Amino acid sequence: MPTKVRVMPTMLYKDLGLVKGVGFDSWRRVGGAMQAVKVYNMREVDELVLLDIRATIEGRSPDFALIDDLADDCFMPLTVGGGIRTVDDVRQLLQVGADKVSVNSAAITTPQLIEQIAAKFGSQCVVVSIDAKAEPDGRWIAYTHSGTRATGRDPLEVAQAVENFGAGEILLTSIDRDGSMTGYDIDLIKCVSDAVSIPVIASGGAGTYADMAKAIAEGHASAVAAASIFHFTEQTPLEGKRYLSRLGFNVRL
Amino acid sequence: MHTVAIVDYGMCNLDSVARAVEECGGVAMVTGEATELGKADRIVLPGVGAFGDAMQNLRERSLDEALYDQVIRRRTPFLGICLGMQLLASKGWEGGEAEGLGWIEGEVKRLEPFAEDTRIPHIGWNEVAYNDDSCLFSKIPDRKDFYFVHSYHFCPKNSADILAETPYGRGFVSAVKLDSIFGVQFHPEKSQQAGFQVLRNFIGI
């Protein structure tokens, strides 16, 4: 029996405030992070993804004190990313309450870090987030530094490489679809999911519950992450799961 | 009020466990001192990471002996969570062969993929089917979902030590029990209401 499909709200924050953008740009403030964590905790969501989108760009380490504060209200699984560069960063994040860490830029520049984290804390706690953008010719390219730096590498190849280095999960975001609420990039998700044996979390573009169903059924994702749909519409993770359950997907209700 | 020692042996996620214990009516005492364990009425061994490193850390701090004194000799109720459950085994294979605490006979092996839709690590919510609701799973519906995040699993030698199983892949043991020694593969501290009930049950034993 496969595991249950997770519906995961993603929270992007900078300077203590929650933001949401479109195509990794035009960031809008969407409220206080603490408040949002409390709400998601009360609603008993499957898992929460918390990403500091400025840390790497500003050359900062993760804000451990902030994560500590946020995790105080977080009795749900928590994945934390942004600015992770060392094994000690990971140790501190796990210590204050993260269950998994999400590594993006460092996974590309220093993939040995993935190997070191996996050896120390186990593959299950290393998520590699891959941000992908389609080139004019249709090929996808992986980006780092919150979508500001093109790596020239194919996300599929990156996914396979980090799996070999010991990554336990992939958070795959389409920059083109991010914030668009026009649906996940199913081709991208399918292509990566089928190329690895670790779970893949679909991200970027969810506008309806039907988009989530598609990412699972056609994209072969193990989980769906979404932000705008929860920030800007009346749709909720629980209603999403009820919808998926009615279609016959295995979810936790 | 029960004092619950949460063993700090450099293998993480202490804060979540301590907060959950406090939410569930226990007094959390996070400690890495072998001499402090005697002050506790309950002992929780959390943990994330490789089996061999974890055992080495316990030995370096003489915590293996202190735990043996408290749990085996003095019968202080014990709960191992995730890696903390796996360490109960005789032997583990994560990061090479290593000897465990050996309180519950068995080995810790890597989860085997069973079908295309069974991805490893096993990450997410899954059902826990228990065979005894008198202790840890009291007041919890059978097959309730708990949160898992692991690549290895405990294979006990004696089926009598199995308290619960989870139908992922070929199925694996998600809780063990021997006298007042308990181990759970899932994370009660992150499993919301059902998880808290497990902790309340453990504290109330």
Image (cartoon, rainbow, N blue to C red):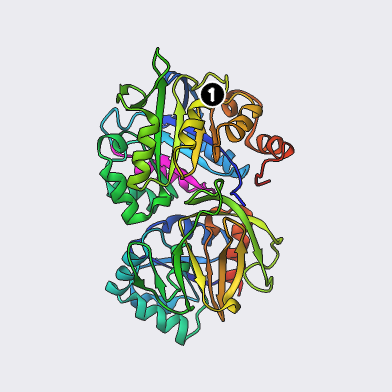
Q: Is residue A125 left or right of residue B58?
A: right
Q: Quadrant of residue B191?
A: bottom right
Return the residue nearer the eye: A240 or A136: A136
Q: Is residue A187 left or right of residue B196?
A: left
Residue B199 in the image: x percent, y percent?
A: 57, 64
Q: Compared with residue B119, is residue A155 higher up or lower down, i.e. above or below?
A: above
Query: Of all residues shown, which one is farthest toward the bottom?
Result: B73
Return the residue nearer the eye: B194 or B86: B86
Q: What's drawn in magenta, residue-wise?
A: A61-80
Q: Quadrant of residue B57?
A: bottom left
Return the residue nearer the eye: A162 or B89: A162
Q: Which residue is mark 1?
A: A205
Residue A74 in the image: x percent, y percent?
A: 51, 47
Could you tell me which residue is drawn at 30 percent across and 32 percent down?
A56
Element type where label 1 sits in the image: loop
Q: Is residue A15 visible?
A: no
Residue A132 in the image: x percent, y percent?
A: 41, 25
The type of residue carrying mark 1 is: Gly
Q: Is residue A145 left or right of residue A222?
A: left
Quick one: quadrant of the N terminus of chain B?
bottom right
Q: Residues within 10 Å of mark 1 (few under 14, many from 20)?
A: many
Q: Tell me, yes or no, whether the highlighted magenta stretch contains residue A77.
A: yes
Could you tell me which residue is drawn at 37 percent across and 48 percent down?
A93
